[in-house]
Amino acid sequence: MPSAQEYFYLAPEMLLATAGLILLLFGSVGRGLGNREAAGVSLFGLALTGGLLGWLHHSVPDRLFILQGSFVIDGFSFFWKALILVATALTILLSVRFLEEGGYRAAEYYALILLASSGMMFMASGYTLLTIWISLETMALASYILAGYFKHHIRSNEAALKYFILGALSSGIMLYGISLLYGAAGTVQLGILAQKLGDALAAGNMLVPLGWILLACGLFFKVSAVPFHVWTPDVYTGAPTPVTAYLAVASKGASFAILLRIFYEGFGARLEWQWVVAVVAAATMIWGNLAALTQENVKRMLAYSSIAHAGYILLGVLAVSEIGLWSVLYYVLAYTFITMGAFATVILLERKEYAGETCADYAGLAQRSKFLAAMMLVFLLALTGIPPTGGFFGKVYLFAAAVQAGWTWVAVIGVLTSAISLYYYFRIVVYMYLRDSTQSTPVPLRSPALVGVIAFCAIATLVLGLYPEPFIQLAKASLLPAPAGQSISVTPE
Amino acid sequence: MFDWVHNIPILSIVTYVPLVGALCVIFFMKKDQTGLIRKFATGIVVLDFLLSLPLWFAFDRNGIGEKLFQFKESHSWIPSIGVRYEFGIDGIALLLVLLTTLLGVLAFISSWSAIHEREKEYYVFMLLLQTGMLGVFMALDFFLFYVFWEVMLVPMYFLIGIWGGPRKLYAAIKFFLYTLVGSVLMLLGILALYFYNAGGLLGWKGLGNPISFSILQFHDIGHLIPHDLQIWVFLAFFVGFAIKVPMFPFHTWLPDAHVEAPTAGSVILAGVLLKMGTYGFLRFSLPILPDATRAMLPWVAGLAIIGIVYGGLVAMAQKDMKKLVAYSSVSHLGFVMLGIFALNGPGLNGGVLQMINHGLSTGALFLLVGVIYERRHTRLIAEYGGISAVMPVFATVFLIITMSSIGLPALNGFIGEFTILVGAFNRVWWWALFAALGIVLGAAYMLWLYQRVFFGPLTNPENKGLKDLSGRELLYLMPLVILCFVIGIVPGPFFDVIKKPVDYLVEKVDPSLVPSSPPAMSAMPAVPAAGARTGE
């Protein structure tokens, strides 16, 4: 039996879930909590969780396994948890004004976000396939509801339904893959799995390739890699915009955390998974960027762009090297601020839930609000990967990792599609700066929280580009150990 | 007298003064204070030019080895990946820096009358562009170089896109996309060098040096890089630089960008931006990849020759003055490339000098076209004719610049072209034939242009009331005219500045190893004497 002390290490996750439950309970009793109070409670809960997480990180050794090896506390999990908390806090700040204007009940919304985040934190630390799968479901179920939170809107309903059906399907496929792997290896614990899978594969067990490919399909679905991306544009467009931002950043980030953990620690060296990732990465970059070219709706364009960015991040995953790992961490960090900032700008420009989402609505923005146009320019430059932004630096190192590992052809596809992406990102710039506005009234900067998030994200984006050193150190301190049986600096031929 | 320059980070100061100016404009000036913004921004670039002048005097012409690159600055920037903040210039970069600051001043003054909308943004972007371009020529760290190289695209995009002609959106995004595609491939080349210098990549065992993006470090390992890796990296660099130059067949963005850009944008585009491509070949391809340079020599020279002839022929057929000048740039830059890839003293000397010459004369031509465009709002040659009668001073200046562009002795173009011809002849004699054909074509299209615009009867009634050059216009044209004469009559000081860097390049690329080079090569001294003497 695990001792009580072991449960103590789960304190941050527990605390966050408790905050969510409190919100649920008090939010639905009587008049319930108001929007701002509920947001305040959630932010307070997040701050406490963050503090606890930091303290825990300093007080445990490098790598601590608890609960019979199903849960691990290491630098890697700390990095992702911190990132998830930051992304969640930013999402909550984005949501306040949005919910007020939509007129929906707020407490449940924040409760769902906190519960989803707590699921994500479990994902970052999960060390058996089952822990990971269950925490993934915790996150996913909450996300399905969040996507449909604007229940009077058919687009929001459609988004939730599509997300739910496809998400449930992918979870099922993943679970099936897990069961096959369990059948072949007799364990779901990642550390042992790599060794056992290698042995089973050597013995010609065909369950192994089938199992890991099914599991990988599920993971690719969660990070919205081609060809498992079809849900992304519809869900991102239909969901309330703060939820879209949350899905694009936190949910995608947590999914990359388990993808890295499973591929690096669970599959190990003897499963030749790099080829699959290479093909998926190439397809994702090509299709994500090409499909984004023709989008008129900014949210839909950002959805395809987030697909394309999943492709770039897979370049780093594919490298299986130290550079590959820290460049993924660094890029996700930069991507968090860039994407949050871009969606925050979209939210500020939206009127009445879904209006103001087309490119044409950005016409002449530079004249209507210099601040917003300049901020959006920073985010779009960063998404394209133009210096001096964090997006540039992150991308360079993802490409560097791929080149070093010998995946030059994927890197070439990466740089070329990245150049193509300039076209659709700059369509918005064209509208903002080079076209005249249909209306001349200045855009009111309505919500201080939103403006604060936008400014913060822009500054973070620039700092990450101009002075990346401390953040590289942070990412380097959060690496996974080498995949079993494989030196992490070895380059595949 | 100019020793103090060595004690301050002069290069950083020159680079960032425009940036600081741009920030001041953004934060402290309102958009309706156009007069103030105009004067302040121009003041900033004049200050920047004055700050860059001491470089010319304090530069040690005889510096070799450690002293080849001078005014060095070196600071740690991103230690965990070996990126340093390193600045430094040799003679080639010195000339380009001075060209940039000078053309900046002239372009700013010329904008006073040309730009009347969104002036605040205009001057902000122009100032940012100055910083980006100066950084490109000064960076001695490949990563830093790349940052400036890409940063600079953004303001240029806006300059074309906001203040350009009717097809500005198309031209702006075409310019940006073309250049970006080239530069991302160059980035992969840089990364390949980076990993080869350290741990190795693919099948190539690395050199095991500490990780670094230092350009001088790459210069040192150039001869150690295996042949096949050199070829790949050379191709990656080639796409990046050839698009920028632009070499045939990568030149199609240039006419669009030039025709649509505002006058000042065209001046900077032709005067400075195109030089970044040739500068890239000089700074990176030749010294870092000598094997590949020698191996690819015939192909590059072939494209350069095609560019010379093709650019000239297409220029001849143009109806629009700006487009004509744009295609003449393709031809002239082909000349520069031919000189550089002659890989011998005269060729490189001529190539470098011709870069400056082209910046001066083509910059002046765009300014002149801008002058007449502001008066008539058309650039169609057929709209003009006989205007030397109403604009005698303008006609004179135009004639001088035309002659400079054609390569008339006593003007700068002659020195550059002649030196390049010597170099090309010494490499492969029939290259010089094609190059000479380019000169003939150049004379034809420029003189024909001059004849159609200035001579003959003044038929178009709208041209009767044209005003001659104003004082301000003379002010920004005169420096170029004077420099054309100075370089044409006393080219010595300019050759002195680039002598050591050219020697260094010749030593690095070692043309004696070029396969099947004509025997005359080895007898050719690697000094620029030929061109210099002829000019005097």
Image (spheres, rainbow, N blue to C red):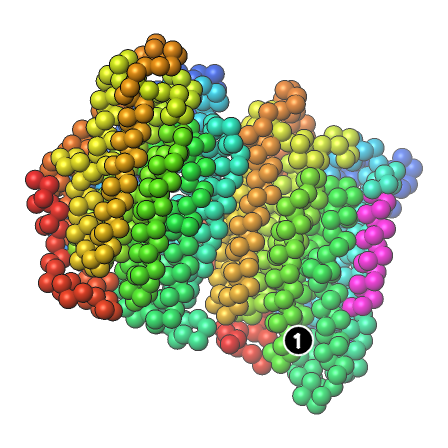
Looking at the picture, how far across and down is residue A435, in whole percent? 58, 28
Looking at the picture, how far across and down is residue B246, in whole percent? 38, 46
Callout 1: SS: helix
Q: Please, is residue B209 above or below residue B311 in the view?
A: below
Q: Is residue B9 magenta?
A: no
Q: Chain of mark 1?
A: A
Q: Amino acid at mark 1?
A: Phe
Looking at the picture, how far across and down is residue A78, in whole percent? 62, 60
Q: Is residue A169 magenta?
A: yes
- Residue visible at 71% across and 88% down in the picture: A204
The answer to whether any part of residue B536 appears in the image is yes
- Residue visible at 24% across and 67% down in the picture: B514
Q: Nearer the viewer, residue B112 or B46?
A: B112
Q: Please, is residue A90 above or below residue B68 in the view?
A: above
Q: Is residue A470 left or right of residue B390?
A: right
Q: Residues within 10 Å of mark 1 (few under 14, many from 20)?
A: many
Quarter of the image with the N terminus of chain A is: bottom right
Name the residue tied to disc 1. Answer: A267
Q: Is residue B92 left or right of residue B381?
A: left
Q: What are the residue bounds of the magenta stretch?
A: A156-174
Looking at the picture, how far across and down is residue A208, in whole percent? 73, 80
Q: Nearer the viewer, residue A168 or A464?
A: A168
Q: Residue furthest top?
A: B465
